[in-house]
Amino acid sequence: MSVHRARVVWRLDAPDAAFAAGRYDRAHRLIFEAGLEVAGSASPAVVPAPFSRADALDPEAAFTGALSACHMLWFLDLARQAGLVVSAYEDAAEGTLARDPEGRMAITRVTLRPRVAWGGSRQPRSAEIAALHQAAHEACFIANSVRTEVIVAPEGGESRREDGA
């Protein structure tokens, strides 16, 4: 077991009345272990400017990125274990914010679109690549932690629908 920590720091930069009226800045800082600090904000799609920042990480994008990165890290290790060499990996992940079956707003779907370049002398077949993606999805700590539907749709490959539960 391991513990992962993040601090979220926000300060009111407007009069109390502006806060009560919902007219306050949602910009904040996310501070992770080892000192990494990231500018955060509500998504401009949810809270319009000037009360959000388009140049900051919003929770929905962070969630989508966390799923993508977790999948990639497992995929790389599983490919290595299979005797394959991955020379590049890029994913254009997309998270969809919509109403869930209970009517609450949620990231209801994340589509991963990994593009993998292979090195080494052995080039995997499509079925082996699909099996690696399936195994990576099943091993991913983040995917195992959420109810969100996660779709892995490698570029140039067949789409797979996986439940995040």
Image (cartoon, rainbow, N blue to C red):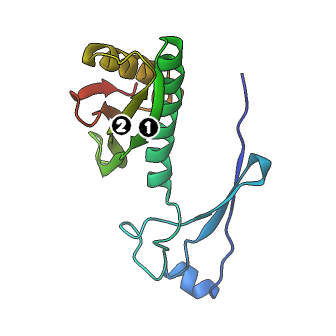
Query: Which image quarter: residue 110?
Result: top left
Residue at 47% from the left image edge and 83% from the top image edge: 50
As rendered, which of 120 and 26 lies closer to the eye? 120
Q: Amino acid at mark 1?
A: Tyr
Could you say which disc has been placed on residue 89 in the image?
Answer: 1
For image coordinates 43% across by 65% down, the residue present is 43
Answer above or below: position of 15 versus 152: below
Report the label total.
2
Three-letter amino acid code at the position of disc 2: Pro
Q: Quadrant of the C terminus?
A: top left
**Callout 2–callout 1 Cβ contact below 8 Å:** yes
Kindly state the secondary structure of the residue where label 2 is placed.
strand
What percent of the width, then of the height, locates residue 32?
Answer: 71, 50
- Pick whichever, 31 or 108, lies toward us: 31
Give residue 127's position: percent from left, percent from top: 27, 14
Identity of the residue furthest to the right in this view: 34
Local crowd size for mark 1, using a 10 Å CA cut-off: few (<14), some (14–19), many (≥20) = some
Choose top left, top right, bottom left or bottom right for residue 16.
bottom right
Residue 160 is situated, as x and y percent measured from the top left of the image, at 25, 26
Label 1 element class:
strand
Q: Which mark is residue 114?
A: 2
Distance CA(mark 2)–CA(mark 1): 7 Å
Q: Could you tell whether 78 is left or right of 110 in the image?
A: right
Q: Can residue 154 be seen from the camera position used here? A: yes
User: Residue 58, image x and y in percent?
Assistant: 49, 60
Question: Mark 1 or mark 2, which is nearer the start of the sequence?
Answer: 1
In which quadrant of the rendered view does residue 45 lie? bottom left
